[in-house]
Amino acid sequence: MTASTEIREEVVESKAQPYYSPEEYLKLEEAAEFRSEYHDGKIIPMTGGTPNHNRIALNFGGALNFALKGQPYDVFMNDLRLWMPSKRVYTYPDVMLVAGKLEFFEGRKDTITNAVMVAEVLSKSTADCDRGGKFKLFRSIPSFREYVLIDRYEMHVEQFCKRDDNKWVLSEYDGADAVLVLSSVSFEMSLGEMYDRVDFESEV
């Protein structure tokens, strides 16, 4: 590859990926028909969820919300934005748990900064990012203590829990009889319940 070719490719990439400030992103997001995430200058459109993706998220988030009724916790699903200021990232977790009072970003009512637990339903296109880069981003949140990754193609869950010595511990769960026990809050759920009505054959 010649130097001129490299320059042309850089120009094309620059045109394809313009830089947006966080303020510009928020203005665009307010008027947008479909949601997008913001990663340090880049706006990344969110892909649509499949029925199975939504079933899993609803099963888990709904059960968690019901179990915590009357307690000082909030459970949010996919619509409330999470801001990580040290990484300059806005994202919409599938399921998010907040303990105590919501901490809104700069007076906004649609963006918080103090998630305790995040759960993401994995797809083939997002699995690597959710396990790697996104997990690193979430760890920049001081209140963040637990990360749950739910496979969409088989009954398999990965759980990362932050210990008091700031080390993260991985636990894995497989099969309908396995029971996920959260560490950030008193809650447990079998994978059979989590995957209720999920049709794995439709994902093939």
Image (cartoon, rainbow, N blue to C red):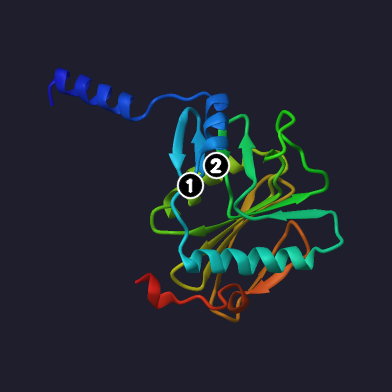
Asked where in the image residue 108 lies, by quadrant, the reply is top right
Neighbour class for label 1 at 10 Å: few (<14), some, many (≥20)?
few
Task: Name, please, the residue furthest toward the right.
Answer: 70
Amino acid carrying label 1: it is Gly
| Residue 42, horizontal then vertical, whole percent | 45, 31
Question: Seen from this angle, which residue lies furthest left?
Answer: 2
Element type at mark 1? loop
Do callouts 2 and 1 mark residues in contact (Cβ within 8 Å)?
A: yes
Residue at (39, 54) in percent of width and height: 125
**Mark 2 burial class by Cα count in 10 Å: few <14, some 14-19, many 20+:** few
Would you place residue 12 above or below residue 71 in this image? above
Q: Is residue 188 above or below residue 131?
A: below
Residue drawn where x is 49% and y is 34% of the image? 39
In the foreground, 137 or 23? 23
Q: Quadrant of the N terminus?
A: top left
Query: What residue is at 72 percent from the left and 56 percent from the top?
Result: 75
Quarter of the picture containing the C terminus is: bottom left
Where residue 31 sits in the image (x, y, percent)? 54, 36
According to the picture, the residue beneath numbered tag 2 turns out to be 136
Q: Which residue is mark 1?
A: 132
Q: Quadrant of residue 76?
A: bottom right
